[in-house]
Amino acid sequence: MPRSAESRKVLAALDAELAAASDRRGQRMVWTAAETAVLALISSTIDRKVWLRRAWSRTDDVKLRLKLSAELRLVETSLARLLKHVTPDVPAPPSLQTVKARKAANARWHRDRSGSDSAV
C-alpha cells in the first residue's frame, strides 16, 4: 500500500495511461500479475526515495548526507529501471517491412519437408 503522496500520484498516472490505452484499443485492459508486482515494487521504491530525501534534508552531517545521496541515486536508478517494465500502451502495428521479413523467414523455416524426408 503506497504511503507517500508521490507514490500514489505515480500509480494513479500509470492507471490513467492504462485507461487511455484501453480506450484506444476499444476493450478493457488490466495489469498482469507481473505488472501488478512491479507496480508494488515501484510504490515501495518511491516511498523509500521520499524517506531518503526527507532524511537528507533534515541532517547537517556531511558524511551522512553523502551516504544518503549515494543511496538516493541508487534508488532513482532502480526506479527508472522498474518503470521500464510497465508499459500500458498498445504496441504499434508491425511495419510493412517487418511483415515482409517475417513472411520470408517463415517461408524459409516452414518449407515442405516431404521431399527431403523421402530421400533419407
Image (spheres, rainbow, N blue to C red):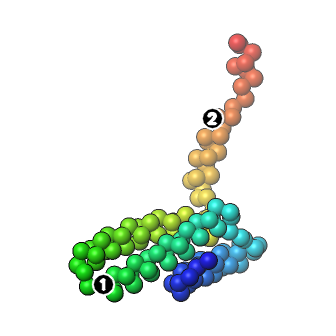
Query: Which residue in the rendered view is the most extreme toward the top?
Result: 120
The residue that appears at 75% across and 73% down in the rendered structure is: 28
Q: Is residue 86 visible?
A: no
* Type of amino acid at the residue the image marks with label 2: Arg
Is 85 displayed left or right of 93 in the figure? Answer: left
Q: Quadrant of residue 9?
A: bottom right
For label 1, the crowd category at 10 Å Cα-Cα, with few meaning under 14, some 14 to 19 and many 20 or more, is few
Of callouts 2 and 1, the N-terminal one: 1
Q: Looking at the image, is mark 2 or mark 1 nearer the viewer?
A: 1
Is 96 or 66 nearer to us in this picture? 66
The span from disc 2 to disc 1 (Cα, nearest Å) is 66 Å
In screen coordinates, is 28 left or right of 6?
right
Quarter of the rendering occupied by the N terminus: bottom right
* Image coordinates for residue 80, horizontal then vertical, percent: 45, 69
Q: Quadrant of the C terminus?
A: top right
For disc 1, the marked residue is: 59
Disc 1 is placed on an element classified as: loop
Query: Label 1 is placed on what type of residue?
Result: Thr
Q: Position of residue 82 (x, y in %)?
A: 51, 66
Q: Which residue is mark 2?
A: 108
In the rendered image, the vertical position of residue 31 relative to residue 50, given as above or below: above
Q: Could you say where residue 60 lies in the image, as x and y percent from the top left?
A: 26, 85
